[in-house]
Amino acid sequence: MNESHPQITKEMVFAHFAHRSTSMERQQIENWLNTNEGAEAYFTYLDEWERQFPQFQADLDGARADFARLVHGKDECVLIKSNQEISPVNPVSETVRPHWQRIKGFLSAAAASAILIIGIWLAKDLWYYKNMSTRNEQTLSIHLNDGSQVQLGANSSLKYPRFWFGENTRYVWLVGDAEFNVTHLPNAERFIVYTPDQTAIEVLGTKFIVSSRQKFTKVFLKTGSIRLTNPMASKPLMLKPGDQVTVSDEKRIQKETIPHLADEPKSQSRKFMFKNTSLKEVAEQLNNVYGINVRIIQPELLTRTVSGTFQAESTLDLLEAVCEMMELELIQTADGYTLQKPKQ
Amino acid sequence: MVTLNPDKDDKNADTPLSLDNDGVIRPDDEILIRRAFVADAYQGCDLLFRRYYQPLCSQAVRFVYDKAVAEDIVAELFKTFWQKRIFERIEYTYRAYLYRAVRHNCLLYLQREAKTTISVEQYLTEELLVQASHPSDQVQFDELAERIDKVILALSPSVRRVFLLSRFEGRKNQEIANELHISLKTVEAHLTKALTVFRKALSHE
């Protein structure tokens, strides 16, 4: 399989979506689409592409509420009609239900209250939770009502209950990077961090760092202990201080112990630690954390790896350091940077 | 045509939902959604909705160049997905089905609009859309999007501006005239021109 589709990379497919592919590349992508992996990966990339370059922000809440109304308001209708043909383009016609008419008044009142309750429930993101987010190169310190502290890294967001935090409600949702300093409560109530990949990090009172990005979730424990659950793990994972757990895109869970606390991956400071990291991952990381596009033209460069810790004032500094180390040329473009081999 | 099973309770027994039970471990980020579907179909649909509604709208708008139409197409897609219980028949990922179907529905919309057939694999039935490997050529869709994008870029700046305000943003002609300080007649003339070019791009092979 690899033999026949040697060079389909995400960069290549992205370039294709941006109408920058050559006809040879198109042909290769077409062939690749005929394989099962290719057909799936294509849509995974398309989805990622649309998230990175959205043409506009569609009104999700409104559409979701409409959808909920459709489902809950017309449930009966769906059951009656489910073995008939419904055209995908024409609106569904109302079926005739004589007995329905008689109890219509009662049912519509019930439906109206159901819709109201669903509406309030759907809108609870707006009123029940507080959402804090940071932009590129911005960090934020958040004090929670239970005395816990969160340092939110760049390009991240944290959602938590607005009211009564600390009374059976010690849970937060994190997208991005954050360092937690959780206070131990007298009643030993658990504090739970949820990430988009369904990882749950349960603690009582500890210090730990979470980095939850598109491809992976990393948890690093400084003090105390953590109970980590993920649907893919057969049993909860217990972490000791110095442990780092990585839950990757492929749902692989990996635990390693980082011996020196000095080497801890700090999410808030602009310190980048790479350990046999491919340039491709470096570019993705820069895109995730700072929203900067880094393009790497020659495919053979994507797999070259970097190791070491970089303390950089800015992403430009970091890129310059990486380029110098790897003898690459850095070119600033309209939407980011391009790395390439210097022309001989 | 596949006959749908009207008995709700039977659905867990023989649907291809639990791909994770076949012993093959694949990278699968939709496993949780699939599990949600087994427990409660609405929950599953809602998860899909939250996850894919916006990117799907963004994909649709690349073809139809109309925000409102794009949102309608995606909402309609989910409606059909729910009403015909298509989620019970997805053979691989929901994502692949949804993107494939949204592209297909955009194509149908454009065909109705241009009253012409567009050279992409014609009329896929839903049965084909749910299958993992059917011959629909996604690259042709990419090329169609490119063609549309190119003709719009080739319009003169003032025509393009009017076209985007009118079609993409859905603004009224009078509003556009006021905002750009041009006459209503000019707005209409620009739009006629842009739409002619746009439709030509659709029918052009």
Image: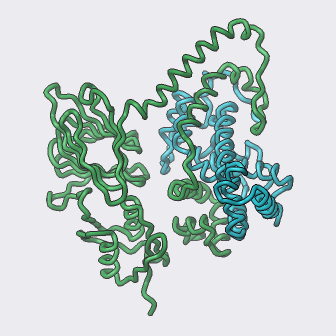
Chain colours: A green, B cyan
The residue at 45%/67% (across/down) is A293
The residue at 52%/68% (across/down) is A11
Q: Nearer the viewer, residue A256 or B167?
A: B167
Residue A250: x, y in percent? Answer: 43, 52
Residue A322: x, y in percent? Answer: 32, 76
The residue at 54%/27% (across/down) is B40
Instruction: Name the residue furthest top.
Output: A102
Instruction: Name the residue furthest right.
Output: B115
Which quadrant, please, contains the N terminus of chain A? Answer: bottom right
Number of residue marks: 0
Say above or below: A203 vs B190: above
Say above or below: B79 vs A103: below
Classify residue A190 as left or right of residue B12. left
Say above or below: B57 vs A338: above
Quarter of the figure with residue A312: bottom left
Classify residue A9 as left or right of residue A193. right
The residue at 57%/57% (across/down) is A46
Residue A81: x, y in percent? Answer: 74, 24
**Residue A188, visible in the rendered structure:** yes
Classify residue A190 as left or right of residue A250. left
Q: Nearer the viewer, residue B87 or A56?
A: A56
**Residue B120, visible in the rendered structure:** no
Classify residue A322 as left or right of residue A113. left
Instruction: Name the residue furthest bottom.
Output: A344
Which quadrant, please, contains the C terminus of chain A? Answer: bottom left
Residue B47: x, y in percent? Answer: 52, 37
